[in-house]
Amino acid sequence: MRFNELNLNKDILDAIKKAGYEEATPIQEKSIPVMLEGRDMIGLAQTGTGKTAAFALPILEMLEPRRKNQIRALVLTPTRELAIQIFENFKKYGRYRKLRTVCLYGGAKKGNQINALYRGCDILVATPGRLIDLANEGHFTLDHIQILVLDEADRMLDMGFLPDMKRIIAMTPETRQTVMFSATMEKKVEALAREMLTDPERIQVAAQNNAADTVEQRLIFTEREMKDEVIINLLQEQLEKDDENALSRKDRTNAIVFTRTKRGAERLNRVLNHAGIGAAAIHGDKTQGQRKDALDRFRAGRTQVLVATDVAARGIDVPSLSYVFNYDLPEEAENYVHRIGRTGRAGEEGIAITLCDKEELELLEAIEYLIKKEIPVVETEWSIHLERIPHRGQGSNGRRRYHKPEGQNGQNGSRENRQSSQRRNHYRSNGGQNKSYRKPRHMSHREKTRHMSENKSARES
Ligand code: ADP
Ligand code: MG
């Protein structure tokens, strides 16, 4: 659908045009009319589907330009990177609108943020902690909020922001319109919605928890000790290809490599740089300045590899990211979907490669259960034979937090469970042929790629 069918003002349409967008994405097409009606709403969509504009455009449309310093829209988001990104989006889409947006986040000096507030604020974008901090200091009130957006609500809950969110919501008038966006609809998100929203319209695009369809997923079974070598070789191979093709900086291959821990990210970053691969690490122990700097360099193509933890990378928007590597499998299965959602954005192609060792088979099982498919295995010279754990179904292990499979039309998951165990049996019964331990042997980079893609196409055909 074209934006001009969505009842938006000309100055907003002009800004969209200037941003280069041709058509509204599905979540935008569905959310914008509901928000313009003033209804509460839950928007369920994967990362990269354009949720920011889905709420920013109607907010810009609905707020009257006014001189009075009253904060009338509030967007809460879990991380500073996201806050900055949303803030920049408001500026982009609102360039012809006389509305001021202010951004508050932790890890930076308060002074500038306070000054910005006193210069006037119509729309506030904030992470919960800093918002409460500055509200307690008496710099603003939320008495005039008309629209409240909870962006990445599932993530805010995961990060333990529930008490903060409740305090903030209690500062806003009950007459407000509340809109919530989430990539997943877990029980706790459901509960939050019941508490904070009034008769919300539920909007969902694409099947829940389906990994973005544009992302090509691959799995390499290997040993933990081999992982550095695998990553270095796969990255070097790609970066060398770039050199041969003499691409401009912006078109060069880039990759995010995910690790589970901050220390893991630091270590891998050192290893990669030692191997001559220009990498930078972002994680929670870095200062705001360091993280912004690393991101800016990465976006500009000056650093080609970013080593990141889940929290640090959440929601980061890098147009045309070529690769996502999962050096470690995520502890929470949903994070797999978030991670691979970093590539293949806005309809572009992307490749996600996951390295799995034998300690991680349970995590793999939880992921494949969530996405309801097996990630295709590719054989490399570092591959080892590992047997997948047949999944034990829901509730058999209280420690693991599976999603209830969302059967269509409200069915329960039994049919899917059955299908998926059939698939697994099939997998096991013919899996023997290709699964012997491959002795490491020397292979040229080119040979390796060919090898990988051959194996892949053999499996897919
Ligand atoms: P999400 O919040 O769902 O993860 P974002 O709002 O960050 O997604 O948008 C992802 C990317 O898609 C951004 O680079 C954004 O500029 C781009 N984008 C958003 N809407 C459109 C559109 N209608 N057409 C083309 N690109 C878009
Ligand atoms: Mg977003």
Image: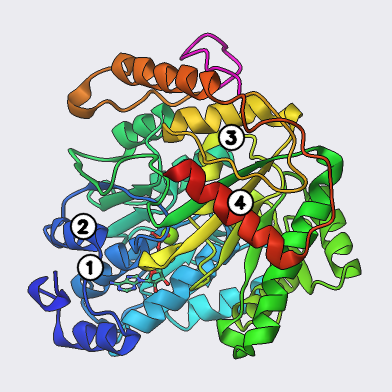
- Residue 430 x/y as whole percent: 53, 23
Q: Quadrant of the C terminus?
A: top left
Which element is circle 2 on?
helix
* Cβ atoms under marks 3 and 4 closer than 8 Å: no
Q: Which residues are magenta?
A: 388-401
Is residue 435 depicted above or below 455 in this figure?
A: above
**Seen in the image, is 173 located left or right of residue 338?**
left
Q: Tag on residue 353?
A: 4
* Cβ atoms under marks 1 and 3 closer than 8 Å: no
Q: Residue at x 68, y 85 (%)?
A: 244
Which element is circle 4 on?
strand
Residue behind mark 2: 31
| Magenta span contains residue 166 | no
Mark 3 or 4: the one toward you = 4
Tell me which label, 3 or 2, sits earlier in the chain.
2
- Residue 163 x/y as whole percent: 53, 38
Task: Name the quadrant containing residue 151.
Answer: bottom left
Residue behind mark 1: 58
- Residue 16 x/y as whole percent: 27, 82
**Seen in the image, is 189 located left or right of residue 300?**
left
